[in-house]
Image (cartoon, helix red, strand yellow):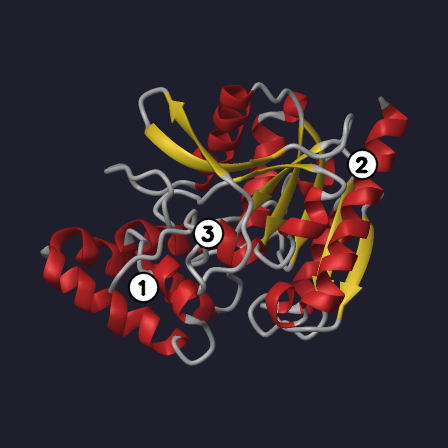
Amino acid sequence: MTTIDINNESEALAPPLPPATTVELDGLGELSVRHVQGPAGAPTIALLHGWTASVDINYFSAYKALGEQFSIIAFDQRGHGSGIRSKKSFRLEDCADDVIRVADALGVEHVIGVGYSMGGTIAQLLWKQHPDRVDGLVLCATAPYFSERREERLSFMGLNGLATLARLTPGQARDWFSEQFYLQRKSESWGPWAISQAAQHDWRMVLEAGHAVGQFSSLEWAHTIDVPASVVATLDDPVVPLSRQVKLFDLIPDADVFRVKGEHDAIVAQADRFVPTLVRAIESVARRANASS
């Protein structure tokens, strides 16, 4: 499958996207990062995307509105899209550290972590591992845990086995596996550009990421989050049940809640409702963070 150059402005299939810059991360190589300078004095938000997506697939509908009020750091997570490739097993904790590595490379001291689904787990870990660098959290369509019922645990465990298979099979088999397992099922709802983005994934790492999400839990420490937080709940979400999103809101002290009627892909499918709500959720965090500084 041909990969579309997302920085090529002549590519009609790609939506409008902010410019990208390349940063060098010690020991990890180069990483393409969308770095938008917002208005003078604007807080910097780190956009963290969901599992099997890329940052552009997740946030393309929101870039313009967000860039009018905030500075932005956005990049693909490990194994996803153009994200970091590593022979090491995927760890959400490493993704949280990557945010700070990128911020350091760009000379950014403090960020507000904005996480969607899997990105919400990374945002929570970002605060846990680097509390002195995080001014606030905005957690969208996410939860303090993703695996509770027996069938969910078995499903997430199975992803790790599939990841092992993907690590061992030759390239041609991986290509076939990727298309059969995922891309074919998404082709009806995603345009050619989005499919081309997903085609860049390292599927061994992506499958390991799914297993890591299934193992994640912040139940024992989310109540200690001491920075301003907003929870954006997707009310009709079949992927992350509303009860789990509400649990996250209940755990975090003084969190604000914002509601969007939509399913797990509401940021794209209901962008007209979701994006303004996301802006308000970030404004709430930024205002409270500024008041406490």
Q: Amino acid at mark 3?
A: Glu
Q: CA distance from mark 2 to mark 3?
A: 32 Å
On the image, the x and y values in percent for residue 106 come to: 54, 23
Give the left or right position of residue 144, taking residue 34 as reference: right
Q: Are marks 3 and 1 in contact (CB under 8 Å)?
A: no
User: In the rendered image, which quarter is residue 176 located in?
Assistant: bottom left
The residue to which callout 2 is attached is 286
Residue at horizontal 68 percent and vertical 75 percent from the top: 236
In the displayed image of the protein, which residue is found farthest to the bottom? 188
Q: Toward the viewer: 157 or 181?
A: 181
Q: In the structure shown, which secondary structural element does the residue marked by tag 2 occupy? A: helix
Question: Crowdedness of circle 3 by 10 Å Cα count: few (<14), some, many (20+)?
Answer: few
Give the left or right position of residue 244, taking residue 152 as reference: right
On the image, the x and y values in percent for residue 78 come to: 38, 42
Q: Amino acid at mark 1?
A: Gly
The residue to which callout 3 is attached is 9
Sequence order check: which comes first, mark 2 or mark 3?
Answer: 3
Q: Toward the viewer: 208 or 153?
A: 208
Q: Nearer the viewer, mark 3 or mark 1?
A: 3
The residue to which callout 1 is attached is 158
For the N terminus, which image quadrant?
bottom left
Question: In the drawing, what numbered circle is on residue 12?
Answer: none
Q: CA distance from mark 2 to mark 1?
A: 40 Å
Q: Nearer the viewer, mark 2 or mark 3?
A: 3
Sequence order check: which comes first, mark 3 or mark 1?
Answer: 3
Residue 236 versus residue 5 in the image, above or below? below
Q: In the structure shown, which secondary structural element does the residue marked by tag 3 occupy? A: loop
Residue at horizontal 28 percent and vertical 37 percent from the top: 86
Q: Amino acid at mark 2?
A: Ala
